[in-house]
Structure formats: C-alpha cells, structure tokens
Amino acid sequence: MSHWPPDARRAPAWTRLPPSRPAAVRRPDTYDLWLLAAGLLIVGTVVFNFFLAFLNTRVMGISQNTVILAELVLIAGAMLLAADRRAGLYALLAIYLSYMALILALRPELDLKAIRDGLIPIVFYFLGRRVRDIAGVDRIVLLTAAIVVAVGLFEYFLLDVFIAYVNVLQYYVARGSLEVAEHIVEGSSLFISGIRMEGRNMLPFLGTHRVSSVFLEPVGMGNYGAFLVLWAVFRKDMAGRGLLFIAGCVVLILCDARFGTMVCFASVGAMLFYRLVPSLIWFLVPALIILAMAIYGMTTDALRWDDNFGGRWLHASWLLLKLDIQGVFGISTYDGFLEDNGYAYSLHQFGLIGVAGLWALYIFAPLRSLDAWRFRVPIIVYICLLMVVSASLYSIKTAALFWFCAGAVDVWRGFASGRAQPVAPPSASR
C-alpha cells in the first residue's frame, strides 16, 4: 500500500543527498610565474654589468648613477618577490636599516653603499627561502652557467670582436671604478687583472688572457666557477649535474682562478667533515682569521708582497691594520682602498656589531634538513676563504645567485624528503 506524501526515509538514497553546491573555481597556482620572475631576476644580476658595458661601448655613455640605478632596480625587484605574510624579512630589514642609520649618522660622510652591501645577502637569501622545489634552482643555475660559458668562449676565441662591442676598460672608467692611469697593461681594453703577464697557472698554453665573460673581471668569474663546482657536487640528484660540473671547471680554467680553485677544493672537502665541527666554532672562525691576520701583520718584517697566497695574506694583514678602533666599529673616517681584504672591508662598512649580527643570523638560521647543514658548512668555508683576499662577495653579480641558492637549500627538505630528518645539525647539540 502506497503512502502519500511519500516517506523520505524510504526514498532512494540519491534523493536524500543534500543539494550540491556550485563547484569552486580552482585558482591557478602562481608559483610557476613567481619562479620564472625570480629566475629572470637572478639572471639579470649576473649579466647586467655586461649589458651596461655594451650600452657604454656601442649605444650611449653610462655613469656611476646608471650602475647604481640598475642595482637598486634589481634589489627592489628581489624584495618584492621575497615579500610574503611572514614578518621575518620585515623585522630584519627594520633592525638592519635602523642600525645602519645609526652607524652612518656617526660617520663624517654619508656612504649609502654600506646599506646596499648588507641588503644583497638579506633580500636574496629570503628570496631563496620562498622556493618550493630545489629543482627550479637547479635550472636557474644551469641557465646562468650556459650564458657565462658561452660568452666566455666568445671572449676567448674572438677577443677583438668582444672588445669592439664590450670595452671593459672604458666601462669601468665610465662608472668611476678605475682610472686610466691604473691600467698597467698597455694596449689592452680588459680589466687590470684580465692579463696575467707572468703566464697562466692552469694550462699555460692558453696564453696570458684571463677570461671574464659577463662578470668583466676575473675575480668574480673565479668565485662563480668555484660555486658552480660546489653546487654540482652537492646536488647529487639534479638533472644536468655532469654538465654543470664541467661548466664550473671550464670557468675556473678560462679565468685562471688559482685561488678560486683552492677555495673550491677546500669547500668540497668540508662536506666530508660537516658533522664534526659544532656551529659555535663555525661562528667564531672569522674572528680567529682576523686575529691571526692582525698578529701576522704586526709581527712580520716583510717589506713587500708577492702575487701568491702568502703575499695576498700579507697584503690583507696590512689592510686590516689600517683600521683604528673607530674603524672596527664602523665609524671610521678612513676612505682608503680596503676591497682586497673582505674582513677589513666588512668591519669598515658594518662595524663589529653589525658583522657579528649578520654572521650569526646565517650560522644559526633554522634548517629543514640535515642535508641543508651539509651544504652550509662548505658555504661557510667558501665565504671565510674568499674574504681573505677580496670583498667580492658583496658584488651583486655573484652574491645574488649565491645567497638565493643558500636560502633555497635552508628550506629544502633534503634528498630523503619522504622520511623524517633531524632539523638541527648534529653538531649544534654538542
């Protein structure tokens, strides 16, 4: 016997389902666009000096303000891409800018370059921490390597054509970084160190020309090559790892980077011992190097320095001793050349408190995997050694990529991302 109205409990199951809601519109993932923008920005930091040198040679004259504006645009772009809802970046920038305002207020002359030097590692490190997949970083590194090697080979084999379009000497003179009288190699339009008159150290049959590629000077090229080799050794599961390793070796050979090669071997070797040294010791390494440098400079009776590691150590020691107590705290009136000693340059720009603070932020920055600590240890060795002979790590053309990769590794879950890993480095618990 049928019932009316029908019993809802006896109705078919499909009739008792709640009314369906309109399907939510799936928002497209914008991460791929973000990664593309970040990659183009990193490539821009590597090649912008090369582009400006081309403009200065073939299109129009540039000035120091042109270079400053280009760097400001790149740093501002990185800051926009690094911004998110977390407060870490904003808090650090506020503290850093407040501290630098205090330092600069105590100086007799305003030097905004000091602010720029610290912004580069902060901004590009946080840009790297927004990376979700380390494979995207691999592709960016490979792209920069392809550009650097291609331009480097073009410079080596077709030097006259290269100079006709990119006159390196004229560019550095136009930007105010070099005086014509300082260029001791007559008839050359390369950077001062672009010709090794005493002959190359690696593969001497290649001649005296030290290739600079898009970096326009061999020191930056050597730092970049050492980092390529380090990244290739560390990223054991990346696509194109062998090609990247070969590219790094080619870069080191083309620019005849003897010190960069030594730094490369030392950094790679540090990977074998990354569990043995506590983080506190790594934090103190720069202080120990500065102390050793100061003692050597005060006790040596040498009157001249040679262009080798011992000579560069002696020269760096003399530069460090040019700082008085005010220079150590970043409020010195000294305006001489300190770029051949990264430690003296850092103290002069940021002061002891600022240097210690920035260094501590990186050494003790949180990690997501033990593999990230395995990368951080050789990076520490890389920084500490390069700072002995130059302040080139503050140059955006190499520092942007370097700190971008460092930030990306720190938030990476490691090679065994499917298994739980200890977050803190084992040495930290000691």
Image (spheres, grey):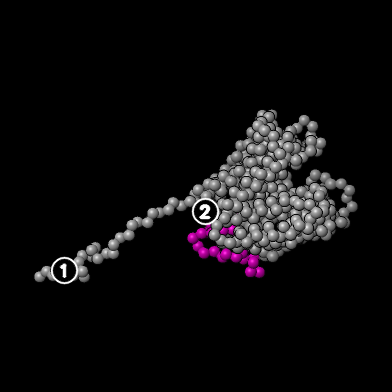
**Residue 250 picture quarter:** top right
**Relative to residue 83, is residue 166 drawn left or right?**
right
Tell me the tag on residue 74: none
Residue 420: x percent and y percent?
A: 52, 64
Q: Nearer the viewer, mark 2 or mark 1?
A: 1
Q: Position of residue 300 (x, y in %)?
A: 87, 54
Mark number, residue 133: 2
Looking at the image, tell me whether mark 2 or mark 1 is earlier in sequence order. Answer: 1
Q: Where does the C terminus fall, quadrant-wise? A: bottom right
Vertical order, 227 against 173 (above or below): below
Tell me if 134 is positioned left or right of 71 in this view.
left
Q: Residue at x 62, y 61 (%)?
A: 91
Q: Is residue 364 visible to us here?
A: yes
> What amino acid type should be assigned to the residue bearing mark 2?
Asp
Residue at image point 74% right, 59% down: 102
Give the magenta part as a residue range: 405-430
Whether tag 2 and tag 1 are in contact, CB under 8 A, the answer is: no
Give the spatial CA distance, label 2 vs label 1: 59 Å
Q: Quadrant of the N terminus?
A: bottom left
Q: Which residue is mark 1?
A: 5
Residue 390 belongs to the span the image colors magenta: no
Amino acid identity at mark 1? Pro
Q: Callout 1: helix, strand or loop?
A: loop
Q: Name the residue nearer the viewer: 9 or 305.
A: 9
Q: Left or right: 146 with respect to 209? A: left
- Which element carries disc 2, helix, strand or loop? loop
Residue found 59% across the figure and 40% down from its top: 146
Q: Position of residue 353 (x, y in %)?
A: 74, 62
